Image (cartoon, rainbow, N blue to C red):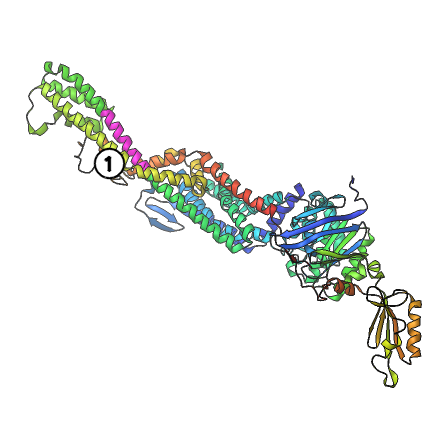
Amino acid sequence: MIGQTLAIFVDAYRELNSKKLFWIVMVLSGLVVAAFATITLTQTGIRFVVWDVDTEFNLQNIPPRVFYYNIIFVELGVKWWLGFAATILALISTAGVFPDLVSSGSIEAMLARPISRTRLFLTRYVSGLLFVVLQVGVFCVASFLLIGIKADLWDPKILLGIPIIALFYSYLFCLCALIGLWTRSTIAALLLTILFWLLVFAVQASENFFFIAKVDRDLGIARHVVAQEVLDKQISALEDLSEEADDLSITDAREKIRRIVRWSYGDDTGRSAKFADRIAARVPNGEEIETASALVSARLEERRESRELLQTYTEHAETSGQWVVRWHNIMHGVATVLPKTGETKELLNRYLVRQEDVEDLNEGTGQDETGGLFGTSRPEGAPQLPADIEGTRQPTSTELSVTLDQESRDRPLWWIVGTSLGFEAFILLLASVYFARRDF
Amino acid sequence: MVADGSAGMALQLKDVAKVYRGRVHALRGIDLEVGRGEVFGLLGPNGAGKSTLIKILMTVIRPTRCSGHMLGRPVGDKSTLRRVGYLPENHKFPPYLSGRKALHFYGAMSCVPRNECKRRAEQLLTMVGMADWADKKIGGYSKGMRQRIGIAQALMSDPDLVLLDEPTDGVDPGGRRDIRNMLEYISDQGKTVFLNSHILSELEQVCDRVAILVQGEVRQQGTIDFLTEDRARFEIRVARPGGQPPTALASALEDLVKTGEDGKPGLADGSLVDIEGDHVSVLTEQAEAVQPIVDSIRQRGLLLTSLRLARPSLEDLFMEAVQDPTTGRQLGPGAARKGKTS
């Protein structure tokens, strides 16, 4: 039994060895790693061999770990080379595995052996992944050594690239095997698999698009909720203050209002202090206020109006953004049953790059408000909220990036790998039943 | 242990049928027996179902109906295949493997231990005359070389039963002779050989028993002697000197040949007679039976030009089997379709 399995693996290696494309991809992998070796960070940009390329970004802020693992290894090496170019070359090389196996004259000699069809199919399937395992193995080991020597970063987690990319490739290869068995055509297996990959990409891109919009919307609503809580605290405190306002001088009343505002924001510096001064000093409708009770009443009235207005803003944001949530749910459902090709590759980022590094990287890169990806939360015709109310502000690009990174890291492993393996198991079940029951 | 009554039989098939998509009857209930140590030949025209039958035995095709045993185990039992060697028709062995590595690979697939694999491969490469080509890639082999490697791979597990599907297909006469010698060698080692071929002379030379398969049915089976036993006949040819009429031979035999109860002409001992012009054929092996005919021919003044005892060849049996008994026409190739019987 072990002899048969070993024989199939050795045969798969010999088949690979006989293919020029296998060695071409191997050489190209070597060249990609060699190209990485020539990239160095400089004061103003990056140096490629001896050529300096200036960039508008301050690359010196990028931690070496992020630069080498995130940008060089994961983004360029894994996502673009292994996860895209080398994957297409691997599919070209391995799309013929099953059409060749079931071709007339070849399959008879294999089936007429003391081995069950299911085991023959599954062993041949796993041995077909050998191409990718060998290619990725060489690439990851070379990258591990390169980054270790160049940046003194010796993280064996980089070798997780081997199972992760093999896993990603297996999502596509299982379908390639099914189509190859069914059509007996290498070209059909290759083209339909690439088409499926594009479909998965489109679904993931749509899901991601609606996910970003949903996160942006949720961040906006969360801000409204926080602002409501702040206003509630202010209103409650001002109500208490109004009972003792008759006994206060106007100066004392202003000071107390300033304290209430600072207390309601939960901090005593920066924006809240500024707002506190502005709120305390504000003169409504240009009228001069002479008594403390009038000042407190005016502030209380103003806060209540704002609270009501904010409520309409929140309700509007929740209602008008419903379609984003609905579409995200639909695309998320579709993505759940499909293999997570992109997110599986992203797992490397999760394991190699620390979240705090990414937060450092994002710090100060985008303080502009997103402006609300699908419009503001202000209902049509509604008046503007006072500028001091934090909830009126949309999240910034940085906040959005950090939240998205966090959300992406928080996506459970079972959802990314488990559902993908579920898809693969289902396809392999179909293929093995078809293989076991078919006459050749 | 065999407890099914198939002891002594390498192959015992009952009612093997294969229907494709409910319409095409590739096999219509095959009953067949092959004794251990026999060389058995299955012949038939293209599309008769020969390869389908072998593929069912080798689990390549799933039968619609099948009850029977191969080497004492039910047909379809995978573990039996350790003891069975198979050469598929029009095989395509991996072109990137050398002959030697292909033998190692197929040996391992048949569960032959590694060391035994190596030993057997060297032995078989010599036997099939491929020792000098053993390290060359199969992709560069001629058809004859591929067949030799194919036979060698079928023998890698030292099988008790060897099924060869068209082993001499596309092989030159020299190669065919070598393959015949190999078959004799395999047979001498006590192995059972099941040979599938449409080259009749080949089967005639090597087979102990044959079966003729036509449109998915076994028409005849037995030893060649048994099948030809009742078909031996004396062929007599005469010349008509002195301008005798073309009916002279029929007239000369008038008194000897009578129409029997079945309406067919025959002699008094029951031997059937067929007279056509100057040629008479008597369906008998007994020389005594034809003496009166010879006497009558001479008395009538006809000249006896030839007299021989003719036994039908396998080809004659084959042609007879593939003939439609009602129309006398040769049956077309291919499997029988639903509702159409031959």
**Would residue A344 be visible to someone looking at this image?**
no
The majority secondary structure of the magenta stretch comes to helix
Q: Position of residue A261 (x, y in %)?
A: 19, 23
Please tell me whether residue A114 is drawn above or below residue B43 in the rendered image: above
| Kind of residue sitting beneath label 1 | Ser
- Given the image, what chain letter belongs to the residue carrying mark 1? A
Please tell me whether residue A240 is drawn above or below residue A72 in the rendered image: above
Count residues near mark 1 (Cα–Cα under 10 Å), then give few for <14, some for 14-19, many for 20+: many
**Would residue B67 be visible to someone looking at this image?**
yes
Q: Which residues are magenta?
A: A213-230
| Residue A360, quarter of the rendered image | top left
Task: Give the residue displayed 76% in from the left and 48% down from the top.
Answer: B12
Residue A227 is one of the magenta-drawn residues:
yes
Q: Position of residue B177 (x, y in %)?
A: 78, 63
Residue B31 left/right relative to A202:
right
Q: Position of residue B321 (x, y in %)?
A: 75, 62
Residue B1 left/right relative to A209:
right
Task: Give the residue displayed 93% in from the left and 71% down from the top.
Answer: B291
**Residue A248 vs residue A229, the one in the foreground:** A229
Residue A195 is one of the magenta-drawn residues:
no
Looking at the rendered structure, the secondary structure element under dot 1 is loop
Instruction: Name the residue furthest front.
Output: B261
User: Which quadrant of the figure contains the N terminus of chain B?
Assistant: top right
Please tell me whether residue B143 is drawn above or below residue A365 in the rendered image: below
| Residue B211, quarter of the rendered image | bottom right
Residue A364 left/right relative to A410:
left
**Residue B9 vs residue B241, the one in the foreground:** B241
**Residue A266 vs residue A239, the one in the foreground:** A239
Residue A218 left/right relative to B64:
left
Please tell me whether residue B336 is drawn above or below residue A164 in the rendered image: below
> Which residue has dot 1 on it?
A377
Task: Give the residue displayed 84% in from the left and 64% down from the top.
Answer: B261
